[in-house]
Image (spheres, helix red, strand yellow):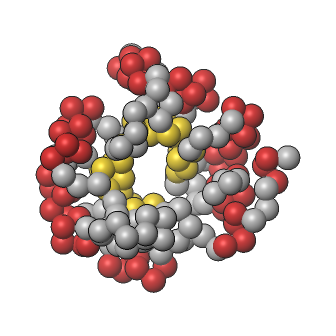
Amino acid sequence: MPDPCEAAARLPRGAGVVARGMAPAALGRLRAVARRRGLALVVAGDGRAALAAGAGLHLPERRVARGLLPFLAARRAGLPGAVLTMAAHGGAAGVARVRRLRPELVFLSPLFPTASHPGAPALGPLRWQAEVRRLGGVAVVALGGVAVRTLRRVPRRAAGVAAIGGLAPQAVALSPQCLR
């Protein structure tokens, strides 16, 4: 979403937002929305930006994260809000990384075929559940193709669901109020 502030303002208390590639000023506005609404906020791929925003850090599976060591040091020291989330797409490398870094939450995807990654093979509910077992007890959120029409097929082991646009009305991304 070019402007996640309006979408974040509509999320229920306790939900979360992953901020990707946002300029510091826009991230500050999103942080304000998250605090006001009681949302968890994690910054994707940049540990220093996460620390500056008082947010958690999300590690993409296939991209290198900047500022990881300072973030991990702050997390180890018990800095409030320094939670770690990770993406996993199935496979031994992702399992090893999750077990090594022990994040609070893992986004395992794609559960179903998804428009954001056309042609990517979906895990499907049975393989998704098998991957969750391999991850060793960490909370795992279902991502990929999650929409109102697929919610009933999300495995019960899911700690939650995540979506880029599948759970929100299209109009959510159309008004760039928080970027003004």
Left or right: 162 as drawn, with respect to 12? left
Residue sitting farthest toward the bottom: 149
Q: How many marks?
A: 0
Left or right: 34 as drawn, with respect to 55? right
Residue sitting farthest toward the front: 119
Residue at the spot x=48%, y=71% of the render? 115
Residue at the spot x=40%, y=76% of the render? 151
Task: Work out whether residue 140 can be spotted.
Answer: no
Place of residue 53 in the rendered image (x, y in percent of width and height, measured from the top left) = 61, 29
Q: Nearer the viewer, residue 52 or 124?
A: 124
The quadrant in which the N terminus is found is bottom right
> Quarter of the image holding residue 109?
bottom left
Left or right: 128 as drawn, with respect to 78? left
Work out whether 127 lies above or below 6: below
Residue at the spot x=18%, y=39% of the render? 96
Place of residue 138 in the rendered image (x, y in percent of width and height, measured from the top left) = 25, 46
Work out whether 11 lies above or below 30: below
Place of residue 148 in the rendered image (x, y in percent of width and height, measured from the top left) = 49, 79
Work out whether 131 lies above or below 41: below
Task: Work out whether residue 116 can be spotted.
Answer: yes
Residue at the spot x=56%, y=67% of the render? 165
Place of residue 62 in the rendered image (x, y in percent of width and height, measured from the top left) = 35, 43
Work out whether 33 lies above or below 45: below
Q: Which of 71 and 54 is in front in this view?
A: 71
